[in-house]
Amino acid sequence: MDDYEKSRELVRRVIESGRRPVILWIYVDDIGKAVERMFRRALTIGRTDQLDRMAASYKQVPEVLSALANEFPASVSIYVADNSGHRGEQQFI
């Protein structure tokens, strides 16, 4: 969801198929904490990304989600879960 054109196309295809897209963004308010968790995942399950890519995504996702919400206000549901605290303390905002 960090690339507007790709995300827009995906949302459009889902809507055209007769379904309603639901997007859940797991948000962390501190990029340092987000990167730390990324490295922890990489060490345990092998899932990682380059640091510059992670930082760019961190910046772009809210902009893309806002643009999608504005373009498809009646057709897409976007939820944000704040995962900034400790494990199990997520809350929807």
Image: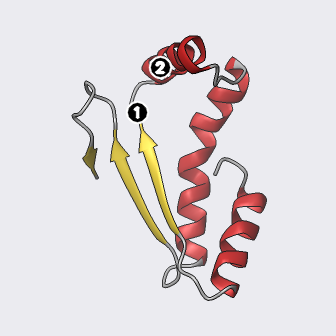
Q: Name the spot of residue 47 as percent of width and height, x first.
A: 63, 25
User: Circle 1 sits on which residue?
Assistant: 28
Q: Identify the residue shown where x is 60% and y is 64%.
A: 67
User: Dot 1: few (<14), some (14–19), or many (≥20) neighbours within 10 Å?
Assistant: some
When the figure is inspected, residue 10 is found, relative to residue 20, above or below; the finding is above
- Displayed quadrant of residue 79: bottom left
Q: Tell me where residue 5 sits by quadrant.
A: bottom right
Question: Are dots 1 and 2 in contact, CB under 8 Å?
Answer: yes
Quarter of the rendering containing residue 27: top left
Instruction: Look at label 1 and name its amino acid.
Output: Val
Which dot, 1 or 2, sits closer to the camera? 2
Q: Is 33 placed above or below 29 here?
A: above
Relative placement, left or right, of 38 versus 4 is left
Residue 2 location, x and y as percent? Answer: 66, 47
Q: Secondary structure at mark 2?
A: helix
Position of 41 relative to 69 (above/below): above
Q: Is residue 31 above or below residue 11?
A: above
For residue 25, side relative to residue 91 (left or right): right
Residue for badge 2: 37
Among the two numbered marks 1 and 2 on one chain, the one whose residue lies closer to the N terminus:
1
